Image (cartoon, helix red, strand yellow):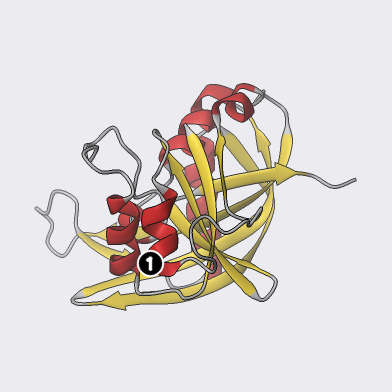
Amino acid sequence: MYMTRIMLKRVPPPNIIHGIVAAAFPGQRNDKTNESLWRIDKLGDDRALIIVSTSCPDQRRIVDEIGANRFGVENDRNKTLDYRPFLGRIENDQTWNFRLCANPVEHKKQKPDDKRGKIFALRFLPEQLEWLDRQGRKRGFIVKGCDVIGDEWKVFNKVRIRAITFDGLLSITDAEAFRVALANGIGRGKAYGCGLLTIARVQV
């Protein structure tokens, strides 16, 4: 597993970023490769592309398209790190700061005999937070406190995805399930910048 951060000069639509990220993993497009697990983060006045992947990406393909610096120009803010040692340090009862850009949805049956129902984006904060709580309990963590720091519609072609960015504090209850969530993401819309969960140490 690898985590990559690339500083951006521009942020194109999600479908364009998906294509750029996928091109950084040539010949490896299959269900076991997380080339589409990515997120755009705001770092001060800058924007960064964060990627978690099972193999090491070709940074050149991304930097040449949307990077803030030309490939090969020294820039310690662009980096790819081996994610496995970090994942190996995850244990039960740890507390971490977290960030997740997700697509909280619900299924509503239009007819009684519908098997699952139509997908609707959750509109209001209480139901979005309830969705996050349910996801956490299935994936090995409990949310201890959380704010919504981003709420936007990603609209392109005929696709509309509501992206909610959660920022808060969590406690790990099942380390193995939590490692899977870090590696594979949470929820829908992963190809378009949703689903990537990241954590950082709590500052004392």
Callout count:
1
1 relative to 199 in the view: left or right: left
Q: Is residue 15 visible?
A: yes
Q: Quadrant of residue 32?
A: top left
Residue 162 image point, x, y percent = 39, 70
- The residue nearer to you, when weighing 9 against 151, is 9
At x 64%, y 26%, the residue is 90
131 relative to 85 in the view: left or right: left
Q: Is residue 174 visible?
A: no
91 relative to 41 in the view: left or right: right
Residue 95 image point, x, y percent = 74, 37
At x 66%, y 53%, the residue is 76
Placement of 79 over or under 95, stated as above or below? below
- The residue nearer to you, when weighing 46 against 26, is 26
Q: Which residue is mark 1?
A: 65
Q: Residue furthest left?
A: 113
At x 56%, y 71%, the residue is 150
Q: Secondary structure at mark 1?
A: helix
Residue 177 image point, x, y percent = 50, 27
151 relative to 158 in the view: left or right: right
Task: Name the residue type under label 1.
Answer: Glu
